[in-house]
Structure formats: C-alpha cells, structure tokens
Image (cartoon, rainbow, N blue to C red):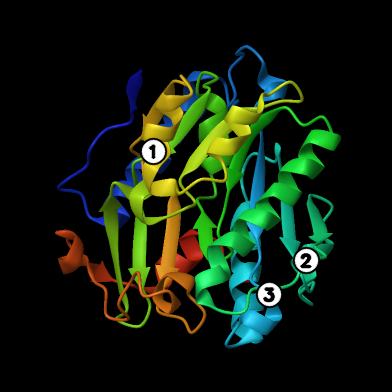
C-alpha cells in the first residue's frame, strides 16, 4: 500500500537541499520546452484546496500575532508558481489583512462558540474544518484536500510539484522544516506528519464517501493507520515542502503542553541550522 516518493538528503544543508529541488524543476522545464506541466491525465482534477481553521480572537494571546502569522501563510501559498489552488479559511472573526481580499481565498464565518481553553482547541479546529468540507462539497470540488495550520508556510513550488505527480488517493509529507524562532533555529524533521497537521493531502470529490472525509478530521499522527483502515492507498513525499515554525506567543502545541518553548533539533536527533533572513525570502513570506 505504501509507496515512496522522493529521496533522503542526509548530508545536504537546508540551503543546498532547496537549491537541488530548484534544479530539479529547472531540468523539468528544460525537458518540456519551458512547460513545467507535461501532459498528464486528469490535470483539471488536481486542484488543491488548502483548508485553514483560524484561531478565535478570544482564544488568542495576541490577535496581532495570529493575523501576522496568517498573512505569511497566505503569502506563501498565493505566490506559488502554479495557481491551480483555492484557499478556504474558517474562523470566528475575520482578520483585517489584505490577503483575505484575494480572489482565490474564501472566508467562512462560523457561528458556534469559541473554545474556552487549550483543551478545546482541537475540537474547535475540527469543527471549522468540517465547515470547510461542507463548503467544498456544496461547490462540487474535485481535487486534493489539504488541512493547513495558519502559522505554516508552503513552498512556492508546492502546487507545481504535487500537480506534476501522478494522481494519488492520498499523499503524506514524511519530511518538512521545523523552526523555533525563539532559538533562531531551523532543521529538517523526519516523520513530519507525526509532528505537524499540515502534512497530508487526500483526494476528494462530490461522490466521496464519509469514510474518506473522516480521515481529514482525525489526529494527524495516525494518518497512515487511518488510511489503511479504510483501504485507501497513499504515497510518501520525502522532499520537505512545508515549513512549520513555533516559538511565537500563540502556538497551540506549546499552549497545550505538547511542545516545550525550547524544543530544538537536538530533541529530534536532527541537525539544526541558524534561521537566517534568506529563508524568509525563499518562502516568499515577506514583501
């Protein structure tokens, strides 16, 4: 059931790894006369729907931080080389950031009460995700559904890469970037899907049964097991394409006690590097 996609780059620095990834796409462009999307089946069915459940203002420690984080996340997606995607954000109060006015973004205002504390954060997130799923079903969406946290960044060629691959029932990101901005450190996290909810894509359409939808609202560390339970095959993507950062004042994993404020690469048996300005520029999260 499990298939491999990509490869390990144990000895490469983060910058070298990203450069190699760029070189890969430049080669694809060269081989296809400047077209990064060679003909492949069901191209129109490979749109990606990014589903963002936004933290409530009443539950946040600093609403300005929440808004700024969301702004960076949206920028990272909107600046993708392939524009075959849509973004749906569900929340209690709409932030006052310019990105939400973009034509590719849909805002959904939920009516249920916000969470009263960290112990209700997960339930709140999943209720908002269900509202997004309902919206997509009503819109007859067909493509990849990807839950995304509002403080994670997407590689600027993420959509291009996913759509260039053969159509899959599900994709799991086995590696990704982790960064503790409090320690000014960044590293590549193995088993990324166990640590970050922005780590899986599931193919859905208007005829998708409830079992497939249910996988998207279950605990992400068990995505492999849950997919196997419903007999859905998946592929592993080993190229790190999502950037998760924490250490800001409103990170849910820290507030729920799942991560320590000084969580580092050493805790993950990984090699940490200094978080430098070029990374912000590379992921296109600053103007």
Percent x, y for residue 94?
A: 79, 72
Q: Looking at the image, is mark 1 or mark 3 earlier in the sequence? A: 1
Q: CA distance from mark 2 to mark 1?
A: 47 Å
Residues packed near mark 2 inside 10 Å, few (<14), some (14 to 19) or many (20 plus): few
Marks 2, 3: nearer the viewer? 2
SS of the residue under disc 2: loop
SS of the residue under disc 3: loop
Residues packed near mark 1 inside 10 Å, few (<14), some (14 to 19) or many (20 plus): few
Q: Is residue 51 left or right of residue 168?
A: right
- Against 143, residue 69 (above or below) is below
Q: CA distance from mark 2 to mark 3?
A: 11 Å
Residue positioned 39% across, 38% down in the render: 23
Identify residue for label 1. Answer: 23
Residues packed near mark 3 inside 10 Å, few (<14), some (14 to 19) or many (20 plus): many
- Residue 56 badge: 3
- Against 97, residue 228 (above or below) is above
- Residue 91 badge: none
Q: Looking at the image, is mark 2 or mark 3 earlier in the sequence? A: 3
Percent x, y for residue 236?
A: 37, 31
- Against 113, residue 139 (above or below) is above
Percent x, y for residue 166?
A: 51, 18
Quadrant for the C terminus in the image: bottom right
Q: Is residue 130 left or right of residue 259?
A: right
Marks 1, 3: nearer the viewer? 3
Residue positioned 46% across, 81% down in the render: 248
Q: Is residue 87 visible?
A: no
Identify residue for label 2. Answer: 112
SS of the residue under disc 1: helix
Q: Is residue 11 left or right of residue 180?
A: left
Q: Is residue 15 visible?
A: yes
């Amino acid at each position: 059931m499990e298939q491999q996609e990509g490869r390990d780059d144990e000895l490469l620095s983060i910058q070298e790894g990203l450069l190699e990834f760029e070189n890969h796409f430049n080669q694809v462009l060269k081989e296809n006369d400047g077209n990064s999307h060679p003909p492949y089946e069901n191209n129109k069915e490979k749109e990606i729907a990014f589903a963002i459940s936004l933290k409530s203002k009443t539950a946040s420690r600093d609403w300005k931080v929440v808004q700024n984080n969301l702004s960076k996340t949206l920028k990272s997606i909107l600046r993708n080389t392939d524009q075959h995607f849509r973004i749906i954000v569900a929340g209690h109060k709409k932030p006052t950031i310019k990105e939400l006015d973009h034509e590719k973004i849909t805002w959904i205002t939920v009516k249920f009460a916000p969470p009263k504390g960290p112990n209700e954060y997960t339930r709140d997130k999943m209720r908002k995700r269900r509202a997004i799923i309902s919206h997509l079903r009503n819109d007859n969406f067909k493509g990849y559904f990807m839950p995304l946290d509002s403080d994670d960044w997407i590689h600027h060629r993420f959509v291009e890469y996913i759509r260039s691959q053969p159509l899959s029932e599900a994709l799991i990101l086995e590696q990704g970037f982790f960064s503790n901005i409090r320690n000014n450190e960044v590293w590549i996290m193995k088993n990324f899907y166990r640590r970050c909810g922005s780590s899986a894509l599931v193919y859905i359409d208007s005829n998708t049964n409830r079992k497939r939808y249910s996988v998207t609202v279950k605990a992400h560390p068990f995505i492999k097991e849950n997919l196997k339970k419903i007999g859905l095959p998946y592929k592993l993507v080993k190229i790190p394409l999502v950037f998760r950062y924490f250490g800001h004042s409103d990170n849910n994993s820290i507030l729920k006690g799942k991560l320590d404020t000084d969580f580092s690469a050493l805790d993950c048996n990984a090699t940490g590097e200094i978080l430098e300005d070029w990374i912000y520029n590379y992921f296109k999260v600053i103007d």
